[in-house]
């Protein structure tokens, strides 16, 4: 099953943005690198002031909650998403849950931590992986591949 088929199945299961409502501003989008060690942006940066509640986008189990390179990070392994399962990552955060905790869609799992290193303004970095492959987190919300409209007008009905 490809990424978009998987993401659409998960989107049907009712997923939510990790911060908001309202829908957060995307400060920096997903820019997949050409190789595993190349430059790129392996997630989305969502505008969120320090202290903002971070919610589980779908049913999951907490599989990591702690510091990485001096910043708080949280990883959720999403329930029923195949093998290897999808994992979402969040940082910088102050985790509010422990490893092994089972969470439901919308449960508060962390708070955005103050951090001046990642974005020009306070943000939450939201990542998505299957195994070691980074994916676009918008796929969880039904944001599959883009469709361009013809330059001369509307798409045919």
Image (tube, rainbow, N blue to C red):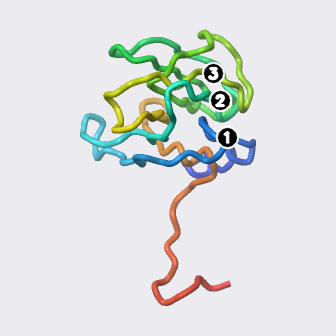
How far apart are the alpha carbons under marks 2 and 1? 7 Å
First in sequence: mark 2 vs mark 1: 1
How far apart are the alpha carbons under marks 3 and 1? 13 Å
Q: Are marks 2 and 1 in contact (CB under 8 Å)?
A: yes
Q: Which residue is mark 2?
A: 56
- How many badges with numbers are in the image? 3
Q: Give above or below for 34 relative to 157.
A: above
Q: Which residue is mark 3?
A: 109
* Residue 103 figure quarter: top right
First in sequence: mark 3 vs mark 2: 2
Question: In the rendered view, does 126 fall on the left or right side of 140?
Answer: left
Secondary structure beneath disc 2? Answer: loop
Q: Position of residue 132 (x, y in %)?
A: 42, 30
Question: In the rendered view, does 47 fall on the left or right side of 16?
Answer: left
How far apart are the alpha carbons under marks 3 and 2? 6 Å
Residue drawn at point x = 62 percent, y = 41 percent? 17
Q: Are marks 3 and 2 in contact (CB under 8 Å)?
A: yes
Nearer to us in this view, 34 or 98 = 98
Secondary structure beneath disc 3? Answer: strand
Residue drawn at point x = 65 percent, y = 29 percent? 56
First in sequence: mark 3 vs mark 1: 1
Residue drawn at point x = 66 percent, y = 42 percent? 21
Q: Residues within 10 Å of mark 2 (few under 14, many from 20)?
A: many
Q: Position of residue 156 (x, y in %)?
A: 62, 85
Q: Which mark is residue 35?
A: none
Q: Give above or below for 118 relative to 62.
A: below
Q: Are marks 3 and 1 in contact (CB under 8 Å)?
A: no
Q: Which residue is mark 1?
A: 16
């Amino acid at each position: 099953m490809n990424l978009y088929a998987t993401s659409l199945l998960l989107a049907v299961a009712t997923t939510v943005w990790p911060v908001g409502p309202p829908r957060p501003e995307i400060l920096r989008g997903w820019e997949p690198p050409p190789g595993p060690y190349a430059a790129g942006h392996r997630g989305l940066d969502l505008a969120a002031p320090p202290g903002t509640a971070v919610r589980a986008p779908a049913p999951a189990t907490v599989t990591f909650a702690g510091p990485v390179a001096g910043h708080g990070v949280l990883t959720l392994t999403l329930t029923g998403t195949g093998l290897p399962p999808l994992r979402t990552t969040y940082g910088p955060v102050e985790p509010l849950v422990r490893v092994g905790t089972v969470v439901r869609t919308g449960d508060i799992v962390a708070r955005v931590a103050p951090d001046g290193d990642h974005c020009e303004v306070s943000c939450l970095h939201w990542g998505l992986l299957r195994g070691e492959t980074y994916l676009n987190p918008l796929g969880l919300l039904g944001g599959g591949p883009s469709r361009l409209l013809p330059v001369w007008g509307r798409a045919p009905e």
